[in-house]
Amino acid sequence: QTLRGQGLISHNLANVNTVGFRKDLADFRSMPVFSDDPALPKTEDMPAHPMSPYAIGKLTGEYYCSVFYQLYGLPAMSLRYFNVYGPRQDPNSEYAAVIPRFITTLLKGEQPTIYGDGEQSRDFTYVEDIVQANILALESSRGFGETMNVASGDRVSLNELFARLRVLTGSDQSPVYAPARAGDVKHSRADISKAREMLGYEPRISFAEGMDRTASWFRKQMETAGG
């Protein structure tokens, strides 16, 4: 269902634009199309070896955008988001990211679970930088038919992330380590030079600032709900 849904959405959006609306289409994607290739940073031209049906669906959308541009001139591009985080993420969602789960668990005085040894690393990207990239893409006259990474261009291990959030939440809890999950990529860090060149994208929010903003938001939400 995941593969079918993602592919149909991209196809239908592109088809509607081709038939008569001629509106620029930016296809927003996340980064799991990459395999567990140890090479870093991840560039857009690296071979895609998706490790899950979810990742296949993401890649399908990119192909639709590229093909519709090549065949019909549809001004479409794809953006690959890397590990987006920030206020308002749902920690209870089936697809919840690690950061809101860690924060809410620590604020409750509970132990979060880390799958694997915690040394796996991610290129965490604050939502405000994602919004910036989206606006640049929609206003751009360049990059049609292309796929571009949108990220911070840096990486942080889950152990480092946990240590940071432990301080920000004032928690004394330690993580529970569980077996690594099948299909998880060990390390990710994006090369964002293409988005810089074509869109003028530049990440503005540091990891420290983004973590502080996000933890503060979740703390206020929990205090409001409890008060």
Image (cartoon, helix red, strand yellow):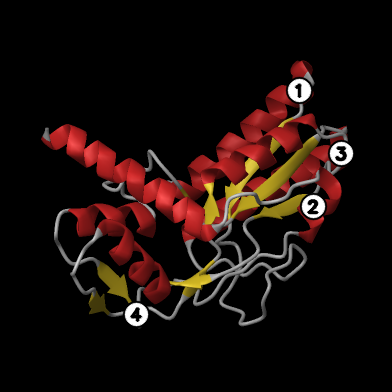
Does residue 145 appear left or right of residue 58 in this picture?
right
Name the kind of residue labelled 1 in the image: Lys
Q: Name which of mark 4 and mark 1 comes first in the sequence.
A: 1
| Residue holding disc 4 | 116
| Residue holding disc 2 | 196
Mark 1 is surrounded, within 10 Å at the Cα level, by few (under 14), some (14 to 19) or many (20 or more) other residues, namely: some
| Residue holding disc 1 | 23
As measured in the structure, the alpha-carbon distance from the residue carrying label 2 to the one carrying label 3 is: 27 Å
Q: Name which of mark 4 and mark 2 comes first in the sequence.
A: 4
Task: Classify the position of the C terminus by image quarter.
Answer: top left
Q: Write the residue at 77% across / 16% down.
A: 20
As measured in the structure, the alpha-carbon distance from the residue carrying label 1 to the one carrying label 2 is: 23 Å
Name the kind of residue labelled 3 in the image: Leu
Q: Is residue 182 visible?
A: no
Residue 93 lies, with reference to residue 41, above or below; the image says above
As measured in the structure, the alpha-carbon distance from the residue carrying label 4 to the one carrying label 1 is: 44 Å
Q: Write the residue at 25% across / 77% down.
A: 178
Mark 3 is surrounded, within 10 Å at the Cα level, by few (under 14), some (14 to 19) or many (20 or more) other residues, namely: few
Mark 4 is surrounded, within 10 Å at the Cα level, by few (under 14), some (14 to 19) or many (20 or more) other residues, namely: some
Residue 63 spot, x, y in % from top left = 71, 49
As measured in the structure, the alpha-carbon distance from the residue carrying label 3 to the one carrying label 4 is: 44 Å
Q: Name which of mark 1 and mark 3 comes first in the sequence.
A: 1
Does residue 130 appear left or right of residue 114 in this picture?
right
Q: Contact (CB < 8 A) between labels 4 and 2?
A: no
Return the mark for residue 71: 3
Helix or strand or loop: what does disc 4 sit on? Answer: loop
Residue 183 spot, x, y in % from top left = 44, 71
Name the kind of residue labelled 4 in the image: Gly
As measured in the structure, the alpha-carbon distance from the residue carrying label 1 to the one carrying label 3 is: 16 Å
- From the viewer's side, name the closer residue of 58 and 97: 97
Helix or strand or loop: what does disc 3 sit on? Answer: helix
